[in-house]
Image (cartoon, grey):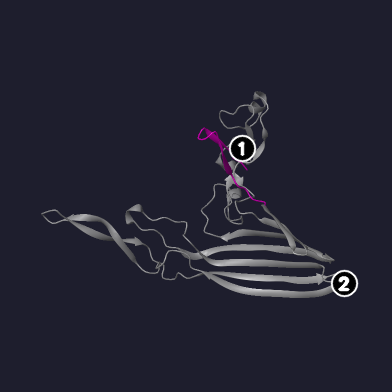
């Protein structure tokens, strides 16, 4: 293929560790606590109490990262196209078990290495450059996608199967699903609704079809505060000793709630 000037395949594997948690959890720790009154003279004495359970087997989180991709130049080096695809599995994530101990013990459970999260995605970069006399220019566009999924985090039992967060992205929230707007009172009377619903209110979907709107009707929302898509475009124009650069960038497939003030402290409204 004569139009290809340069092409390189690449692949890599790496392993990273993370120990960004409370230190010394493998040791028994004690802290000053409420004291005691001892003896006939009722003298107060300060005391020590164990502040946390130990985990002698605690170790680092481990992330295995796999990358494949290519770099290319074609049509007399005017066009460039680079692509990278990645997969990351984080094992031994330090999280606390879904369990509790009696409050009278005053002990908190230690972190344990059992969480697992997968991440995968890709990045594409397309570029073009050319020259005409004293004028030269270059254009570049990029697009990236990344999505994570919880594989294991000792999730507590969910009230209904569709509310399990295992298998969902980190930060997934359980929310009610909107199915339209109530137009009149007659429509409200015919459909499941929350107490006090009036025309103009949002219709909440009765997901479990039991004729009532309850907490069991909440479902995992498909977007989190972390954007899954990022993109950008930049240009560079030059004429002799003059230059002009520009950059446009953005992010998508995420949810962010913004508080906008109205007349000082009089109120605010939400924007998604």
Residue 3: mark in rendering: 2
Point out the image quarter for the C terminus. top right
Task: Decide which of 104, 143 is in the foreground and name it.
Answer: 143
From the top left corner, tell me how far across and down residue 265 is, in percent: 50, 35
Magenta segment includes 270: yes
Q: Earlier in the sequence, mark 2 or mark 1?
A: 2
Q: In which quarter of the image is residue 245?
A: bottom right
Query: Could you say whether the residue bearing mark 2 is in a helix, strand or loop?
Result: loop
Q: Is residue 190 left or right of residue 91?
A: right
Magenta segment includes 121: no
Labels in figure, total: 2
Q: Which residue is drawn at 28% across and 57% down?
A: 33
Label 1 Cα crowd, 10 Å radius (few <14 / some 14-19 / many 20+): few
Task: Decide which of 8, 5 is in the foreground and name it.
Answer: 5
Up the image or down, 259 lies above or below 31; here it is above
From the top left corner, tell me how far across and down residue 211 is, in percent: 62, 34
Point out the frontmost of discs 2 and 1. Answer: 2
Q: Quadrant of residue 119?
A: bottom right
From the top left corner, tell me how far across and down residue 82 is, in percent: 75, 68
From the top left corner, tell me how far across and down residue 84 is, in percent: 71, 67
Residue 210: mark in rendering: 1
Q: Is residue 60 left or right of residue 69?
A: left
User: Which residues make up the magenta segment?
Assistant: 252-272
Point out the image quarter for the N terminus. bottom right
C-alpha separation, residue under disc 2 versus residue under disc 1: 63 Å
Q: Which residue is drawn at 64% across and 74% down?
A: 13
Query: Could you say whether the residue bearing mark 1 is in a helix, strand or loop?
Result: loop
């Amino acid at each position: 293929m004569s139009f290809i000037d340069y092409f390189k395949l690449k692949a890599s594997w790496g392993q990273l560790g993370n120990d960004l948690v409370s230190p010394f959890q493998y040791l028994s720790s004690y802290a000053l606590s409420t004291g005691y009154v001892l003896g006939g003279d009722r003298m107060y004495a300060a005391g020590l109490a164990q502040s946390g359970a130990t985990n002698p087997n605690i170790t680092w989180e481990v992330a295995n990262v796999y990358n494949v991709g290519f770099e290319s130049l074609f049509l007399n080096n005017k066009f460039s196209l680079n692509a990278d695809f990645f997969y990351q599995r984080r094992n031994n994530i330090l999280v606390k078990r879904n369990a509790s101990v009696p409050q009278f013990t005053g002990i908190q459970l230690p972190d344990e290495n059992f969480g697992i999260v997968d991440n995968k995605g890709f990045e594409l970069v397309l570029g073009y450059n050319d020259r005409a006399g004293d004028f030269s220019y270059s254009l570049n566009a990029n697009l990236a996608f990344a999505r994570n999924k919880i594989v294991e985090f000792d999730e507590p039992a969910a009230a209904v199967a569709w509310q399990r967060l295992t298998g969902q992205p980190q930060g997934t929230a359980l929310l009610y699903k909107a199915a339209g707007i109530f137009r009149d009172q007659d429509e409200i009377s015919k459909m499941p609704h929350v107490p006090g619903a009036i025309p103009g209110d949002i219709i909440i979907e009765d997901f479990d079809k039991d004729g009532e709107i309850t907490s069991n009707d909440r479902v995992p929302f498909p977007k989190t505060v972390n954007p899954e898509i990022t993109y950008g475009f930049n240009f560079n124009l030059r004429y002799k000793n003059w230059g002009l650069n520009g950059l446009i960038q953005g992010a998508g497939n995420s949810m962010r709630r913004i508080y906008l003030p109205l007349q000082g402290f009089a109120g605010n409204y939400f924007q998604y």
